[in-house]
Amino acid sequence: MEKKGGFETVYDGAAAGVLTFEAGTALADEVSACLQLVKQLQTDFKDDAAIVTGLKQLEGDLHTLRFSKEPADKVKQKLDALMQLPVSGEKTIRLDAFRKKASKPVDGAQEYQERVKRLVKNTRANILLLLAAAGSGDDKLTQLLNELIQFNPEQPFAELKARMEALAKNPLLVHYNQKKRAFLVEWLKPYQAKLGDKIEQMTEERLMEAARQVESIRSMVLKELAKVVLESNREPFKAYNRTMQPVMNGKTVDFWGTQEVRDEFIAIVNKMLTRFSFNLEDRFLLFRTEDGGFMYLVGFADEAVENAIELKDGKYGVTPHLKVFLSRGGQLQEIVAGNYKVNRAAYYRALKTAIVPFFSAMAPLLDVTLSEELKSAFDMWV
C-alpha cells in the first residue's frame, strides 16, 4: 500500500486498485443484521421473482449505507425507509416484521461509550487523511494517531469520562485541530473569489458554512472553467452502473499500460469525487460536456460496492471505474467493446479520445498536472 498526495491506493494481491473507505455508519451492527435478513429472505422467496428482484435492489442500498458518514438519526431514517419493500402494484412487504423485536434500551453510559467510539474512529480516519495530504511526516499527528489506536473505550463510565476530559486538554489534539483547519482552508481556496470573506480569517462556524456554500458555487465554476456540467439526475444511468467498466477501472492494468499510470487514474478519480462532494451512497457522479457530446460516469459500480474488500483497521477497499457515453442521433450510448469486435485497439482509442480531453479540462480544478506518462500511455493504441 502506498500513500501519495491525498489519496491511498491499494495494489497488493486481491486488494489491487481500490480506494479505501471507513465503515462509517453509527448503526453498523444494525445494517449488517438487515443485510443478513435480506440474504435469508432471498432464499426463502426464491420462487417469487418480483420479491427477489426487490430484495436484490435493497441489498445494494444496504451495502452503501455501511459507508454513510451521516449522523445516527439520519442513517436510522434511511434504514427505516428501506424496511418497506414494494414488490408489485400496491403489494409491499414490511421487512421490519422479520427483524428481532427484543432490543435492550441503551442507557446513558452505553450511549456515551458508543459516542466515544465514533469520535475516536472518525478522528483516526481524519488523521490518516491529513498525513496523506501532507505528503510528509508529522510526528505530533502520528503520536496522536498511535494514542488513539491504543485508546480503549471499553472501561467504566467514570474512567472513560476522565480520559476524554484529559484528551480534550492534550496539546496533540490542539495541533490536530490546527492541521484540520488548515486542510479545510486549502480545500476552499479554489472558491475564494466566490466566498467573499477571506478564508484564512474565517471562524470555525464560518468555515463550515463556507463548505456548505461551495455546494452551489462549484457547479458554476465547473461550467465556466471546464465546460462541463455536473448532472444531478443519475436515475437513468443507474442500470449502467451495475457492472464495472471492464478496462477503465482501478483493477485492470491492461488499458493503462503500467501500474503507475493506473494509480494516477485512481488519484484523479479520488480528487474528482472529493472535490465534488461525492457521497458513497450515491455510488457515482455524472459529468456532461457543455455541448452534450459526451457523458462521463465516475465512481463505483454496484458490484464493486457489494464486493468491497475488507482491509485492516475497519477500512474497506472499493475499486473505482469510469464509463463514457457518446451522443449519437441525440441519444447517449455507452462506448463498449462490442462495437469494436474486430479491432480492440480502436476500442481503446475511442476511450482515449473521450477521456484525455475530460481529464485535461478537469485537471486545473483538481490542482493536478497530468503526467507525460499518462498521456503517452495511450500512444500504444493510436
Image (spheres, helix red, strand yellow):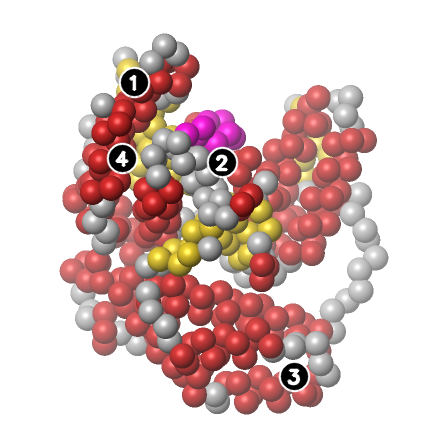
Q: Position of residue 222 (x, y in %)?
A: 23, 45
Task: Name the element at disc 4.
Answer: helix
Quarter-wise, where is residue 147 in the image?
A: bottom right
The residues tagged by marks 2 and 1 sit, at their Cα atoms, a distance apart of: 25 Å
Task: Name the element at disc 2.
Answer: loop
The residues tagged by marks 3 and 2 sit, at their Cα atoms, a distance apart of: 41 Å
Task: Name the element at disc 1.
Answer: helix
Counting residues from the start of the chain, the first of labels 2 and 1 encountered is: 2
Q: Position of residue 376 (x, y in %)?
A: 22, 36
Counting residues from the start of the chain, the first of labels 1 and 4 encountered is: 1
Question: What residue is shown with label 2?
Answer: 301
Q: Is 237 left, or right, of 181 in this rendering? A: right
Q: Position of residue 334 (x, y in %)?
A: 37, 22
Quarter-wise, where is residue 353 in the image?
A: top left
Q: Amino acid at mark 4?
A: Ala
| Residue at the (20%, 28%) spot, across then down | 291
Give the overall secondary structure of the magenta segment. loop
Question: What residue is shown with label 1?
Answer: 346
Residue density around tag 1, few if under 14, some if 14–19, many if 20 or more, within 10 Å: some
